[in-house]
Image (cartoon, rainbow, N blue to C red):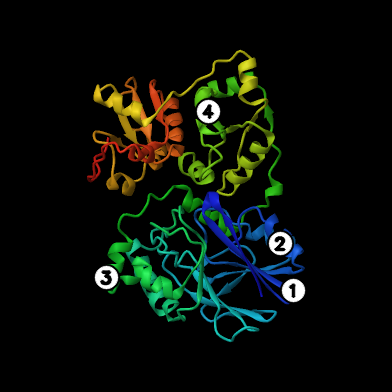
Amino acid sequence: MYFEQFYLGCLAHASYLLASEGEAVVVDPQRDVDLYVKAAAEHGVTIQHIFETHLHADFVSGHRELAARTGATIYMGAQAGATFPHVPVRDGFELKFGSASIRVLETPGHTPESICLVITDIEKSPMPWAVLTGDTLFIGDVGRPDLSPRHTPAQLAGLLYDSLHTKLMTLADTVLVYPAHGAGSLCGKNMRAERSSTIGTERLTNYALQIKSREEFIRQVTSNLPARPDYFAKDAEINRTGAPALSDLPPLRAIAPRELKTMLDNGEFALDVRPGDEFAAGHVPGSVNIALSGQFASWAGTVLGLSAHPVLIAASDAQIEEARVRLARVGIEGLDGYLQGSVAAWKQAGLRVAAIPQMTVNELENRLRSNGIQVLDVRRAPEWEAGHIEGASWWPLDNFKVSPPELDHGAAIAVHCKGGYRSMIASSLLQRAGFRNVINVTGGFDAWQQAKLPVVTAKLVGV
């Protein structure tokens, strides 16, 4: 049997291609499906089956386009209520492809319709070889139980406990575990960095599987969940109906600098995807920076929302195309165009350029000694509680879509995150909101700790 994992770092998303005797299966495909078609052609196999382990909330799936291009059948948990042509599957459903098989386990908990797929390579052994666990069981973690509008988190957490202990933990310790997400995904709390594991390893090391009682499991799994972006519910609904093909999106319009100036004056906004240092050195006033490095699409969905219609600003045509695909992966499709000639053309047109000053952690420490600056920490709650700069205010970047922090618009504000990626996003949003003296801290809290500067730990104090 041929087996390949495809890992999409910006979404911390894993999808899979399995094949036996020329017959191929794709599991949890990403929005842009060319890579599966190409891999199938290279290995001389035909994609005939597509499984979705659940209605994904953090990205838009490519199942509908992949089925249209290959003629493959889509399989999904019977509780999904999917409206596209598919086979609703339940416990015990088995698909044989070549000399391999997939057996479905219904594992509600992360979502009501979640399923796991037990893989057997019959040529090698009649016993299961691996299980594709979707968002039910991660490496070191389990799926968050707060994504259903029809169930409370406690109800789903109880179902998740049952699914883990009556379904997955009955598999042999040697069975390999391949989840749909890795470290950095918001679909769990704190996944490990590995891309695969075994049932035995998870049984011994996964915190959620060490909890003995169902009641304590519910309490722990529903506590301290990461913020749930608004776009999660919308992506799940898109996946319920199936997204259109990326090729159906209209071409982006090139926008001259002075036309963009008029658009911005009328309330539209620009999304600058260049690296943070380039943005800080000079950018279109009022534009928001989310650099293509890092978890670009997730943060775009979180702070902009799916209804956003930005004009893209990038350093090259390749960056424009990459940004468009990555935005479409989370469902942001309504782009108003791109700045022709980038920031260089804006400058040549004689239009004003804004900047964001930056400082090192040592410079920040010197300013703090003279009480000349306010520190804003935009990391998430667990990061703050583990350690932060004394006297800092806390307002996580996830909250910026709701409102900016309540700070003096004229005060000097040094913004930091863990390493500098989120703080530049926050700095651009603050500047856009009218804060006049925003400074980005290079290297973030990591650099602060490396410099052995003082750190305090405490419960949250909002701004």
257 up-or-down from 288: above or below: above
* Residue 28 picture quarter: bottom right
Residue with the mark numbered 1: 22
* Direction bottom: furthest residue: 126
The disc label shown at residue 215, or none: 3
Q: Residue at x 58, y 49 (%)?
A: 329
For label 2, the crowd category at 10 Å Cα-Cα, with few meaning under 14, some 14 to 19 and many 20 or more, is some
x then y, percent, for residue 313:
60, 30
340 up-or-down from 146: above or below: above
* Residue 208 picture quarter: bottom left
Image quarter in which the C terminus is found: top left
Q: CA distance from mark 2 to mark 3?
A: 45 Å
The reply to whether dot 3 and dot 1 touch (C-beta < 8 Å) is no
Image quarter in which the N terminus is found: bottom right
Residue 406 in view (yes/no): no
The disc label shown at residue 279, or none: 4
- Give SS at disc 3: helix
Q: What kind of residue is marked 4?
A: Phe
Q: Nearer the viewer, mark 2 or mark 3?
A: 2
Q: What kind of residue is marked 3?
A: Glu
x then y, percent, for residue 292:
56, 40
* Residue 349 picture quarter: top right
